[in-house]
Image (cartoon, rainbow, N blue to C red):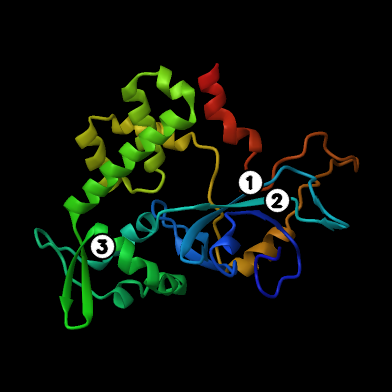
Amino acid sequence: MALFEGLDEIRLLIAPDGGVLGNGVGRLLSLRHPKSGNSTCYILNNELLQELHWFKQPYTSWFLGDYVAEDGRLYTATSVDPVFILLPIFEEARMMKGDDLGKFRQLDEILLIDGYPGYQQLLSIAENCMQIVCQVKEIGSSKFFRLDDSKVMAWLYYKVCQLKQSLLTLDKNYAAQDEKVTLSDAVSILGEYVKHDPWLKQLCTRLGVNLEEITRKATDTGAHPFTVETEPGSSFSQEKNKSNNKTTRGGKQTKKAKLETGSRNITEMFSRASRRKN
């Protein structure tokens, strides 16, 4: 499939089948990553928000029927809870000062982010999903939102418990290890989408989990989201011009090719599971 309008190159994307729920036409959005703040690519398809990842080994292409796709990257789109993506935006929007709880604001005002028009596309899903972590006031036909710390912590606690149970179900190795270790793993996964201060720090305090251990585990994760420095379309053009075919002074090709800048070896995605089995 072509990921962007105006680009004829074909790329392989693995994603949930949006055609089952609707017309299957996705919209690519550039949004801030909730933890790093870097521009990251997301796909909005039938009000389902998905995070776009990619990885590639050197000298790879895809054979798609009778066509050879030159770009050998594998793109994957995984569902992500919009609350994670919108949490830092709503935190900034309330404009807290000292002990003041901040301001109530309308959604269209909160999601008006300079340089990120993609947030406006989330208006339809933000009204429903953000009520779980916000106080809401209705004046006439208008709704005003303000992030509520106690609701955020309750939601994060629920997410950790849900994730912990999922780990026990998906991997039998978790059932054999100490429950505290499993809890720490669940918090570390959650910590990839939550800022340390204040949310992750408060969550670790409530659960009695070591924050330094959580931070160390978060840095060991293998997969990274697809980030962009400018517009998504231009980022692909820049990537296409990169070359890994380094040569020596004698004109011979180097024996060991380096991975493309920003890519990750697929084996790294399974490193954590491998270590547990060992």
Check whether the beta carbons of the residues at disc 3 and disc 1 lie within 8 A of each other: no
Task: Look at 35% across and 39% down and name the residue there.
Answer: 162
Q: For the residue labelled by badge 1, is the local secondary structure a helix, a strand or a loop?
A: loop
Check whether the beta carbons of the residues at disc 1 and disc 2 lie within 8 A of each other: yes
Give the tally of numbered discs.
3
Task: Look at 31% across and 37% down and name the residue there.
Answer: 161
Q: Residues within 10 Å of mark 2 (few under 14, many from 20)?
A: many
Front-most of 79 and 103? 79
Give the residue type that dot 1 points to.
Ser
- Residue 130 sits in quarter: bottom left
- The quarter in which the N terminus is drawn is bottom right
Spatial CA span between label 3 and label 1: 37 Å
Q: Which residue is labeled 2 in the image?
A: 73
Whether residue 215 is visible: no
- Residue 206 sits in quarter: top left
Q: Of circles 2 and 3, which is in front?
A: 3
Q: For the residue labelled by badge 3, is the local secondary structure a helix, a strand or a loop?
A: helix
Q: For the residue labelled by badge 2, is the local secondary structure a helix, a strand or a loop?
A: loop
Q: Residues within 10 Å of mark 3 (few under 14, many from 20)?
A: some
Question: Residue 73 location in percent, x, y?
Answer: 70, 51
Q: Which residue is labeled 3 in the image?
A: 131
Give the residue type that dot 3 points to.
Gln
Spatial CA span between label 1 and label 2: 9 Å
Question: Residue 133 location in percent, x, y?
Answer: 24, 57
